[in-house]
């Protein structure tokens, strides 16, 4: 993956926290299928993400597989049991859905390379929803996808009414980011409040949950260091966008009194 050249920094101070138990992991829904662009041409490499929603949402990154020269994506929707006989057994795990005692209907939306995809075939016959309950643990469903080509910088300029000759290195709204960087981050170049930034820190068991502004279809990397000047090491790559605000759990190190974090926007090669 190629990463953008702009980063966000956040300093954190260590403090003691008490670990809490989490829910009981359950076999989830496995979705797999073929990928193509809108003219039917198969795709052998792509970034596929899913948003699955009911009362809450999870965002999933899919893996790409090559089986005897045929390319497929595969993604697992994670579920967990959070109570038994009405008694809570643990805290909710981030990016995981609760397995309800009765079947529940969920909406699903896919993006391919950052653009909305169309479900062209679903084994269940329901392209944009699925129902999942205790009897569905480990269910496998084929869901084939088609998508438009990824947006170009010129198309992004046109989308926001900017001339095709606009300088990619300019910053007309004074955000501290060039237009090329704003395009990579998926921002609105005409809105000074459309920003790529950290928006909060929440103490949780054994660490903190860091939050930053995010855009649908984007992938992020999170890095940590003990100084604003680095060096930095990668905590996680391929973090799927949760549009509006992304969050990620960071364990607090035991060998430093402070921690610096930075987020990078990833781009498909």
Image: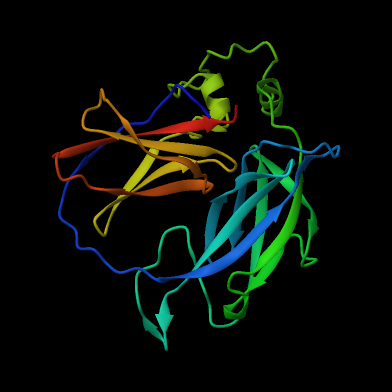
The residue located at (63%, 13%) in the rendering is 166
Residue placed most toward the observer, 219 or 185:
219
Q: Is residue 252 above or below residue 152?
A: below
Q: Is residue 207 visible?
A: yes
**Could you tell whether 260 is left or right of 248 in the image?**
left
- Residue that lies at the very extreme toward the front in this rendered image: 68
Q: Report the coloring of the rendering.
A: rainbow
Name, please, the residue furthest toward the right. 39
Q: Nearer the viewer, residue 245 or 14?
A: 14
Residue at figure coordinates x 19%, y 63% from the top left: 18
What residue is rendered at 52% in x and 49% in y? Answer: 242
Count of marks overlaid on the render: 0
Q: Nearer the viewer, residue 206 or 25?
A: 25
| Residue 240 locus on image (x, y percent) | 52, 45
Q: Quadrant of the C terminus?
A: top right
Instruction: Indicate the position of residue 87 as horizontal and vertical percent values.
Output: 37, 84
Q: Is residue 175 above or below residue 120?
A: above
Picture coordinates of residue 132, whole percent (x, y): 62, 73
Tell me what residue is drawn at x 45 percent, y 21 percent: 5
Q: Residue furthest bottom?
A: 85
Q: Nearer the viewer, residue 109 or 22?
A: 22
In the rendered view, does 19 fall on the left or right side of 190? left
Is residue 189 visible in the rendered image? The answer is no
What is the x, y in percent for residue 213?
A: 45, 41
């Amino acid at each position: 993956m190629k990463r953008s050249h702009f980063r966000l920094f956040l300093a954190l101070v260590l403090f003691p926290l008490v670990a809490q138990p989490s829910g009981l992991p359950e076999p989830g829904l496995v979705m797999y299928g073929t990928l193509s662009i809108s003219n039917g041409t198969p795709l052998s490499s792509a970034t596929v993400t899913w948003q699955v929603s009911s009362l809450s949402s999870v965002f999933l990154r899919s893996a790409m597989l090559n089986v005897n020269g045929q390319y497929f994506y595969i993604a697992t929707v994670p579920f967990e049991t959070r109570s038994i006989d009405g008694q809570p057994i643990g805290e909710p795990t981030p990016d995981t859905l609760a397995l309800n005692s009765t079947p529940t209907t969920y909406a699903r939306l896919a993006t391919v390379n950052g653009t909305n995809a169309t479900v062209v075939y679903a084994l269940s016959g329901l392209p944009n929803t699925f129902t999942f309950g205790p009897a569905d643990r480990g269910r496998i469903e084929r869901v084939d996808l088609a998508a438009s080509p990824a947006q170009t910088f010129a198309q992004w300029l046109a989308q926001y009414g900017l001339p095709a000759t606009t300088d990619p290195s300019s910053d007309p709204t004074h955000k501290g980011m060039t237009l090329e960087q704003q395009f990579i981050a998926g921002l609105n170049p005409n809105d000074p409040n459309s920003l790529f930034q950290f928006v909060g820190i929440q103490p949780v068991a054994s660490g903190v949950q860091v939050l930053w502004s995010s855009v649908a279809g984007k992938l992020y990397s999170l890095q940590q260091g003990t100084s604003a000047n680095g060096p930095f090491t990668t905590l996680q790559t391929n973090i799927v966008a949760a549009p509006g605000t992304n969050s990620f759990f960071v364990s607090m190190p035991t060998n430093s009194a402070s921690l610096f974090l930075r987020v990078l926007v990833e781009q498909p090669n």
